[in-house]
Image (spheres, rainbow, N blue to C red):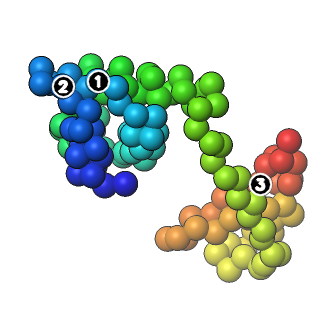
Amino acid sequence: MDNTILKKKLSTFRSSEGYLVGVSPEVLHDLLRAWESWTGVSKDFYRSIGVNQNQVAFLLGKAKKMVREGAFPAEEFKEVQFSPAVSMMSSVPCNGIELSWEQGKVIRFSKEGCLIK
């Protein structure tokens, strides 16, 4: 979700004194997902959604508590199937699982048990 949309959603819960009051669980969930996907400086995140650090900390705390209590549906688990392929990136044989990423990055797991417990 774009932070501009999140900012508009949060502004609907702003009181006349400037406090965020009665923020809906859906908006808290959106805030938590936006925060988890943010890769920049936290100060820039606060600024982009128009909320100060203390307000965000309080709202994120509420959202995390709701997640722990199961208020939000669990994210769908997506199983990834890999077909055995010959690695063109390296000459080192791999007996387990090998994931080839962009720009020549390779992750190797020696055994399938490393991934599944």
Residue at the spot 21% in from the left edge and 30% down from the top edge: 14
* Viewer can see residue 77: yes
What quarter of the picture does the N terminus occupy?
bottom left
Q: Which residue is mark 3?
A: 109
What number is the disc on residue 15? Answer: 2
Answer yes or no: do the residues labelled 2 and 1 have beta carbons within 8 Å? Answer: yes
Mark count: 3
Left or right: 29 in relation to 96: left
- Residue type highlighted by circle 3: Phe
Left or right: 105 in relation to 49: right
Image x and y of residue 78, in percent: 70, 58
Residue at the spot 49% in from the left edge and 71% down from the top edge: 103
Q: Which residue is mark 1?
A: 21
- Calculate the distance from the C-alpha at mark 2 to the C-alpha at mark 1: 6 Å
Q: Dot 2: few (<14), some (14–19), or many (≥20) neighbours within 10 Å?
A: few
> Residue 21 is drawn in which quadrant?
top left
Image x and y of residue 65, in percent: 53, 23
